[in-house]
Image (cartoon, rainbow, N blue to C red):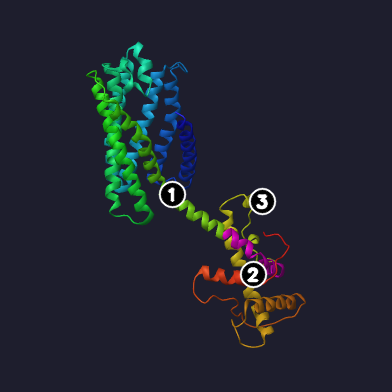
C-alpha cells in the first residue's frame, strides 16, 4: 500500500505529459488511445483506495467503488488493446477490431455490474477488498468469484494481446525501439502469468477452493515487476526522445550564449538586420518558453552570418590581398574589429561580399562551429544577450 501513492503521483505526472502531447498532435490516433489508457489507470487508484478503506463515500459503499475502479482498469486495458491495433494494423482494420473489442468490454462490464448488484450485503465489504482471494469468508460466494474472474479474464486477454503484438513487432524493430519492445513483451508476459493465476484463483472460489498460498504469493510478487517492465517499455521510446531533445536544447542554449560576443559586435553595427524587427515577438514571454531557446539560437546564427556578409568587403579591404580563409581565428577576430571600426567611422568600401569563417564541409552544424570558433576568439562582452 505504501507504493500506491507513489504510483498515483507518477501516473498523474504521466497523464499531464500525455495530455500536453495530445494538444500538440490532436490527430494522432495512437497517442489518443495511450493517453486514454493512462487517464483510466490514473483514475483507478483513488477508487481502489476508497474501496479498500471499507467506508462509504458519496453515498456509495466500498463495493461500488471497487466496481468503478475495475471499470477504469478494464477500460484502460481496452485502450491498450486499441493502441496496439492502431499501431500494427491499417486504420480501417484497426477500427473494426476496436469496435469488436468494445463489445467484449461492454459484456464484461455488464457481468461486473450484475455481480456487484447481486452481492450479498454481508459480503460487500469483503468483496471490495483486493485481498478477498485470501479471505476464507469469500470462498463459495458466487458473486465475488464472478466479479473477479470476469475482470481478470479480460485483463488476461488484454495482456496476451499486448505480449503477442509487441513480440511480433520486435522482429521489425531496431535500436532503442527494439529494446523497448523487448521490455514491454517481458512485462506483458509476466502479467499474463499473473492474470492466469488470478483467473484460476477466482474460478476456484466457485468451488469453495483456494489456490495454495505459495502460488497466490507468486502472483502477487510478479505483479509489481510485471507492471514496472510494461510501463518502462511503453515509456522508454518517449523517454529516449525527450533525453535527445534535452541534449539538443542544452547545446543550442550553450551555443546561443557563446555566440554573444560576435552577435553583439555585429548587431551594434547592423541593428536593422535583427530578425525581431521583421518577426515581432514578446521577449519577456519568449524567455520562459522552452522552445524559445531553439528560436533564439537559429535567429542568432542567421543574424551573425548576415552581419559577416555585410562586413566582409571591409575585411577583404583590410587584408589587402586574396588570402581568403588563411587567417587564424584570432587574426580574423582582429580584422573583424578593425572592419567594424572602419565602417563606424564612415569609411565607405565597395566590393562584393567574400566568405568569412566559411566551414570546410557543408551543413548547418559546420557553419555554426565556425561561428563559435570566431566568437571564442573575441573577448567577452558585457552586453546582455537578447
Q: Which residue is mark 2?
A: 376
Q: Is residue 188 above or below residue 278?
A: above
The answer to whether residue 102 of the structure is visible from this angle is: no
Please provide percent x and percent y for residue 21.
Answer: 47, 45
Mark linked to residue 66: none
Q: In percent of the image, x 52 and y 54: which residue is there? A: 246
N-terminal label among 3 and 2: 3
Q: Is residue 235 above or below residue 156?
A: below
Q: Which residue is mark 1?
A: 238
Image-based side of 212 in relation to 3, left or right: left
Q: Is residue 256 magenta?
A: yes
> Which residue is farthest left?
207
> Which residue is farthest bottom?
321
Image quadrant assignment for residue 123: top left
Image-based side of 131 in relation to 3, left or right: left
Q: Is residue 92 magenta?
A: no
> Which residue is farthest front?
214
For numbered disc 2, what is the local secondary structure? helix
Please provide percent x and percent y for residue 367.
Answer: 55, 71
Q: Which residue is mark 3?
A: 284
Q: Residues within 10 Å of mark 1 (few under 14, many from 20)?
A: few
Find the magenta span and give its range: 252-270
Q: In percent of the image, x 45 and y 31: which residue is there? A: 4
For numbered disc 3, what is the local secondary structure? helix
The residue nearer to you, when weighing 193 against 357, is 193
Amino acid at each position: 500500500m505504501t507504493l500506491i501513492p507513489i504510483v498515483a503521483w507518477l501516473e498523474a505526472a504521466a497523464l499531464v505529459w500525455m495530455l500536453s502531447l495530445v494538444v500538440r498532435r490532436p490527430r494522432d490516433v495512437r497517442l489518443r488511445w495511450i493517453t486514454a489508457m493512462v487517464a483510466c489507470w490514473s483514475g483507478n487508484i483513488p477508487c481502489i483506495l476508497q474501496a479498500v478503506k471499507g467506508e462509504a463515500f458519496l453515498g456509495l459503499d466500498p463495493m461500488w467503488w471497487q466496481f468503478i475502479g475495475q471499470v477504469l482498469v478494464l477500460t484502460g486495458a481496452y485502450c491498450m488493446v486499441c493502441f496496439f491495433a492502431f499501431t500494427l494494423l491499417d486504420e480501417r482494420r484497426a477500427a473494426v477490431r476496436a469496435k469488436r473489442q468494445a463489445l467484449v468490454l461492454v459484456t464484461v462490464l455488464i457481468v461486473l455490474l450484475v455481480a456487484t448488484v447481486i452481492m450479498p450485503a454481508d459480503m460487500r465489504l469483503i468483496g471490495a477488498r483486493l485481498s478477498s482471494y485470501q479471505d476464507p469468508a469469500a470462498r463459495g460466494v458466487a458473486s465475488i468469484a464472478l466479479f473477479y474472474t470476469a475482470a481478470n479474464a479480460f485483463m488476461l486477454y488484454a495482456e496476451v494481446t499486448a505480449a503477442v503484438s509487441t513480440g511480433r513487432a520486435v522482429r521489425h524493430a531496431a535500436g532503442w525501439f527494439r529494446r523497448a519492445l523487448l521490455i514491454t513483451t517481458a512485462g506483458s508476459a509476466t502479467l499474463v502469468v499473473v492474470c492466469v493465476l488470478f483467473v484460476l484463483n477466482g474460478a476456484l472460489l466457485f468451488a469453495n477452493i483456494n489456490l495454495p498460498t505459495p502460488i497466490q504469493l507468486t502472483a502477487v510478487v510478479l505483479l509489481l515487476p510485471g507492471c514496472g517492465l510494461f510501463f518502462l517499455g511503453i515509456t522508454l521510446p518517449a523517454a529516449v526522445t525527450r533525453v535527445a531533445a534535452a541534449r539538443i536544447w542544452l547545446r543550442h542554449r550553450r551555443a546561443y550564449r557563446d555566440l554573444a560576443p560576435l552577435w553583439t559586435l555585429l548587431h551594434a553595427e547592423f541593428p536593422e538586420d535583427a530578425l525581431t524587427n521583421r518577426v515581432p515577438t514578446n521577449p519577456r514571454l519568449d524567455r520562459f518558453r522552452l522552445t524559445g531557446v531553439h528560436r533564439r539560437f537559429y535567429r542568432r546564427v542567421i543574424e551573425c552570418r548576415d552581419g559577416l556578409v555585410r562586413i566582409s568587403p571591409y575585411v577583404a579591404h583590410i587584408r589587402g590581398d586574396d588570402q581568403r580563409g588563411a587567417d587564424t581565428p584570432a587574426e580574423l577576430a582582429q580584422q573583424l574589429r578593425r572592419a567594424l571600426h572602419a565602417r563606424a567611422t564612415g569609411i565607405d568600401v565597395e566590393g562584393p561580399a567574400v566568405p568569412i569563417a566559411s566551414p570546410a564541409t557543408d551543413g548547418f552544424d559546420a557553419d555554426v562551429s565556425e561561428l563559435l570558433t570566431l566568437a571564442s576568439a573575441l573577448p567577452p562582452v558585457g552586453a546582455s544577450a537578447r
